[in-house]
Image (cartoon, grey):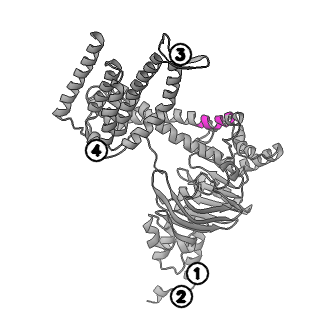
Amino acid sequence: MRISIEDVHFVYPGGVEALRGVSLSIEPGERVAIVGQNGAGKTTLVKHLNGLLRPTRGRVRIGDWDTAQVEVHRLAQRVGYVFQNPDGQLFCRTVAEEVAFGPRNLGYTPEEISQRVAEALALAELEDKAEANPYDLSPSWRKMVALASVIAMDTPIVIFDEPTTGQDVRTIRRIERMIEMLSQRGKTILTITHDIDFCAENFERVVVMGQGRVLLDGPKEMVLGMEAILAQTYVEPPQLTRLGMRLGFEKTVCTSEQFLETLRRRLDHPQSDPRAEG
Amino acid sequence: MVERLSFYLERSSPLHRLNPTTKLVVAFTLILVAFLGPGLLLPSLIFLLILTPLSFVGQVGREFLRTTVRLLLPLFAFLFVMQSLFYPGGKTVLFGFWIFSVKLEGVRFAFLTATRVLVMVSSFLLLLFTTHPGVLLLDLTQRGLPASVAYILASTLQIIPQMQAKAATILDAQRSRGLDTSGSLGRRIRALLPLVGPLVFGSLVDVEERAIAIEARGFRSSRPKTSLVEIEDRPLERALRWLCLLAIILALGSRLWP
């Protein structure tokens, strides 16, 4: 399902202009990370995708639906949104019930619900905790419950708001595996993040926001190399990318694989390195 | 997103610069005078000639009037209907219809009660609009109010806006999971649990966290505490507060020896 954001402006009731003309188009199955300083308008933008906010000017379309015309609970069929804080949504006595809440709201049959719940629990690696009370779990597992409860809705588009904040490496790996699986099933994935390594390792396309505008938008190899523009919105390229720049790599590298491959090629053909000649 | 955590509106006005205790004393005085003082018109005069002009001095006039009307209009409508029709012992019938008759005594009583409530609510609103809750409580504790009482007051002042912000986030999260909050009454009641559950639980967690946070800052320490914030208190204001006391005594006197 295609997302199209056309020249969206948004002013909060208090008068704060949070979006000043954002246009983006996201194709089905893309993996997009949105980065930028606090207050850049990232959350405001993604809240437009499931109708929690309506543009002051401009238009947001999810497939053939204009989000300004459709209620939030119906948009939930197309866009799943995982909030930053899981405690703002958990209320059921067991993890399984919590995960079933979304699909039940969407009106699936009981068989479909139990199938989707089972799949979501598997993706979130929560199978052995299905009967636990969410509030007896540790905060990082509660986060996984929140993720599972949105994934179980089986929406073509899934939005994560800062999924890795405050999580240890094990949980981050779990989230990464989950994103990979969702992506294989053809879901469009959007993530807001301040974790630039997580962004570089897991997303192909990076959108950089600053002061309510899109500053950069493109493949991560292009975007994460633009150090000067990134600095405008207080984003630093990943450490490996910066190391690659220091070493004079011609191409921007984002992942450890890319880095090692470039390094290996250089070691194999030292004559092609401009600095080795000088 | 800008979240309002208290009623306080940041402006730069003479009213904002007043010592918080002075404002508190003035608010209490106006309320006591309105309730104790003589005459049918006294409370409405206090509202029109003191509170409303003061709110414009404090540059919060528009918000002041809007909030007051919104808070009190439904109450006043109810008060006038009930009292004008059912006030016991009313004799002077203004007009009647069907089996009801509107009596002058009832209308007078409703008017007096309404304007007294108006003074009570609006003077506190004005205080809260122009005084940062932290500064008010700091000033009171420095004047000897026990810290635990200050804490209870602070949490009451701040709890409503905090709960509102929390409730809005929860509502957004559950609507994103397909919760339909519109429609029939039964549907709406069923939609309550997913909203109230996280709100209550989250508030309990908040209370615990806050208790730990303030304890970490030496809340129960019995030594005298110093503060980075210095609150001004001019001699003129001290005089004003004594005047307030005098006004309360006068009002009380008018009640005891009419």
Q: Which residue is mark 4?
A: B13
Q: CA distance from mark 4 to mark 3?
A: 45 Å
Q: CA distance from mark 3 to mark 2?
A: 99 Å
Q: Chain of mark 2?
A: A
The answer to whether one can see residue A1 in this image is: yes
On whether disc 1 and disc 2 are found on a single subunit, the reply is: yes
Image position, residue B251 (x, y; %):
28, 18
Q: Chain of mark 1?
A: A
Nearest-to-viewer mark from 3 and 1: 3
In the displayed structure, would residue A226 be above or below residue A102?
A: below
Q: Which residue is mark 3?
A: B86
User: Which segment is the magenta one?
Assistant: B189-198
Q: Nearer the viewer, residue B224 or A49?
A: A49
Residue at disc 3, secondary structure: helix
Q: CA distance from mark 3 to mark 1?
A: 95 Å
Q: Chain of mark 3?
A: B
| Mark 3 residue type | Phe
